Amino acid sequence: MTMGLEKSYIVFMVGGLLSFTLGERGIQMLEQKASQIARAEMNSGRNCCQAVLVAAGQVWNMPVEDEILAAANLFGGGMGSGCTCGALAGMVMAAGIREQYCQHPRGGKLAQDLHDQFKEEFGATCCRVIRKKRSVLEKIGNQACAELTAKAAALLVRQWEGIDNGTETASVNYHTHAK
């Protein structure tokens, strides 16, 4: 067993910024937490975009204001027209909020990366296309959407933590987190 996988995270101070790297076990725990929160939010009546935002907010302890959730309300169901999946929109919105507190190594390319990884994982970014691929049973209720949203929240966590190539880490500035 690799020693680095035994610890959830390493914390150190660099120039006033709190930086951390999570081990694989820590990443898996965050992914699972994000997934569970997103699924629960979907089951409680939130749409896919809102559920991803709430999950990211809770996992990373970042504020997701009521106004943001109100705006995200219009992204459900592919913005009501079946276009861009609301879970993808929620991933990009959450990444944008987190950028206020933490610089992602991919910077401005993060949205493109999230889009591409979402498309690779689910076969499309269009809500209408994703729904058409489902079986008749999967189309009943919103459980297939809840499952996709849970996976999207986990995908956001994995991408953010830089596990895709094993070398990138996020640098977090909690000094800007205070209101």
Image (spheres, grey):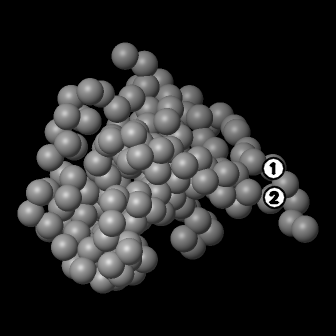
The amino acid pointed to by label 1 is: Lys
Can residue 98 be seen here? The reply is no
Q: Is residue 103 left or right of residue 164?
A: left
Between 167 and 163, the one lying in front of the other is 163
Residue denoted by label 2: 4
Residue in the picture at 44% in, 37% down: 57
Residue in the picture at 38% in, 72% down: 138
Residue 156, image quadrant? bottom left
Secondary element type, mark 2: helix
The amino acid pointed to by label 2 is: Gly
Q: Is residue 38 left or right of residue 4?
A: left
Q: Is residue 161 left or right of residue 146?
A: right
Between 176 and 41, the one lying in front of the other is 41
Q: Position of residue 118 (x, y in %)?
A: 37, 71
Count residues near mark 1 (Cα–Cα under 10 Å), then give few for <14, some for 14-19, many for 20+. few
**Mark 2 touches mark 1? (CB < 8 Å):** yes
Residue 87, image quadrant? bottom left
Secondary element type, mark 1: loop
Residue in the picture at 47% in, 24% down: 175
Farthest residue to the left: give it: 81
Which of the labelled discs sits on residue 140, or is there none?
A: none
**Marks 2/1: CA–CA distance:** 6 Å
Q: Position of residue 121 (x, y in %)?
A: 42, 77
Residue in the picture at 32% in, 42% down: 46
Residue denoted by label 1: 7
Q: Is residue 178 left or right of residue 136?
A: right
Quadrant where the image shows the C terminus: top left
Look at the picture and state if 107 lies above or below 12: below
Count residues near mark 2 (Cα–Cα under 10 Å), then give few for <14, some for 14-19, many for 20+. few
Farthest residue to the top: give it: 179
